[in-house]
Image (spheres, rainbow, N blue to C red):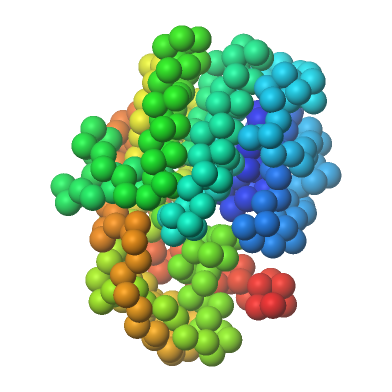
């Protein structure tokens, strides 16, 4: 029986990953770790995992990995561990500027604890959620994994530090470490602080949408099922011991285009509130996904409009909770 440990498993991407693992693989054990961080309401995370809490082989541990020493974690998880998927992190560029030390604690110390836990369990497959934000100021589009990295936020810095910490543990302890650079993941259960969720909620409530800058900033929006497809590929990857791989959609959508698309999907007009550009934000993200295709068989299949409609369907199903 394979045992997967998924940190941040009650979150947006983590809950989708766990559901996929339980669907496609029989006879597995999944330990989901999440501290239900108040960055957004815990009831949303409970919604994410509500239908899998009673699944055979599923176990939930509420704990803070940055405050849990590896030895203590090993006492809680006594079984052998085959794969660790480390998604837990303090997320968000702008909040990290206000509280950089909290981001270092969770994103670096938390990762350190999980790597030491992997070492103690002799776990040889470690998947790490990195971020496109590590590229920072870089106009060599589309971005390839070997670009020069110039992060411009504390959050991005912690993700770059995480990649390098993983390289250290690969070299010292022969842990296979796969860092996946996520590009603006969206879809059902998306975090409420992210643009698509936040804008949809504002439009439905008749509230203004903040548009930072002139609306020409753009993002490589990646549907969550495609991101999960890439994670599953990384779980099975065994050819080399250390890799950094982009998981994007290989196209960029501007902020203006995003708002227009949400207007079309919801059938409602947005009220635009013009604001200054935000520190820490990059002008554009755009992934070269050639490496992911080659190494992981990655192939994003969900078009942007289709993905928005799936998100909106989920939003309407849960509107009583989401429109509070």
Asked whether residue 6 appears in the rendered view, the answer is no
| Residue 30 picture location, percent across and down | 71, 33
| Residue 299 picture location, percent across and down | 37, 44
- Pick the residue in front: 248 or 23: 248
* Viewport quadrant of the N terminus: top right
- Pick the residue in front: 215 or 66: 66
| Residue 251 picture location, percent across and down | 28, 56
Q: In the displayed structure, would residue 163 be above or below residue 309?
A: above
Q: Residue at x 76, y 47 (%)?
A: 52
Q: Horizontally, is 224 left or right of 216 in the view?
A: right
Q: In the displayed structure, would residue 149 be above or below residue 190?
A: above
Q: Residue furthest left?
A: 140
Q: Residue at x 51, y 39 (%)?
A: 104
Residue 311: quarter of image: bottom right
Residue 241: quarter of image: top left
* Viewport quadrant of the C terminus: bottom right
Q: Horizontally, is 53 left or right of 40 in the view?
A: right
């Amino acid at each position: 029986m394979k045992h997967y440990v998924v940190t941040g498993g009650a979150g947006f991407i983590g809950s989708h990953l766990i559901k996929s693992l339980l669907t496609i693989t029989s006879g597995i054990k999944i330990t989901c770790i999440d501290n239900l961080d108040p960055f957004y309401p815990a009831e949303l995370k409970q919604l994410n995992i509500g239908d899998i809490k009673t699944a055979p082989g599923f176990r939930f541990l509420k704990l803070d990995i940055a405050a849990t020493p590896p030895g203590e974690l090993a006492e809680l998880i006594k079984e052998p561990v085959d794969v660790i998927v480390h998604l837990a992190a303090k997320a968000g560029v702008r909040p990290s500027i206000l509280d950089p030390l909290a981001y270092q604690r969770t994103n670096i110390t938390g990762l350190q604890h999980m790597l030491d836990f992997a070492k103690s369990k002799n776990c040889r497959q470690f998947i790490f959620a990195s971020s496109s934000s590590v590229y920072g100021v870089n106009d060599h589009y589309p971005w390839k994994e070997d670009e020069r990295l110039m992060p411009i936020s504390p959050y991005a810095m912690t993700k770059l530090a995480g990649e390098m910490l993983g390289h250290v543990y690969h070299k010292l302890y022969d842990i296979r470490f796969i860092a996946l650079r996520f590009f603006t993941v969206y879809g059902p259960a998306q975090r409420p602080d992210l643009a698509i969720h936040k804008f949809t909620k504002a439009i439905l409530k008749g509230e203004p949408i903040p548009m930072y800058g002139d609306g020409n900033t753009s993002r490589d929006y990646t549907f969550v099922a495609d991101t999960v497809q890439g994670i599953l590929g990384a779980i099975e990857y065994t050819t080399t011991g250390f890799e950094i791989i982009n998981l994007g959609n290989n196209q960029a959508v501007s902020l203006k285009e995003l708002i227009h698309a949400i207007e079309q999907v919801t059938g409602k007009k947005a009220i635009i509130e013009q604001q200054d550009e935000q520190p820490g934000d990059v002008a554009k993200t755009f992934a070269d996904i050639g490496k992911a295709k080659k190494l992981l068989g990655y192939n994003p299949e969900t078009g942007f409009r289709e993905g928005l409609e799936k998100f909106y369907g989920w939003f309407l199903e849960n509107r009583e909770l989401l429109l509070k």
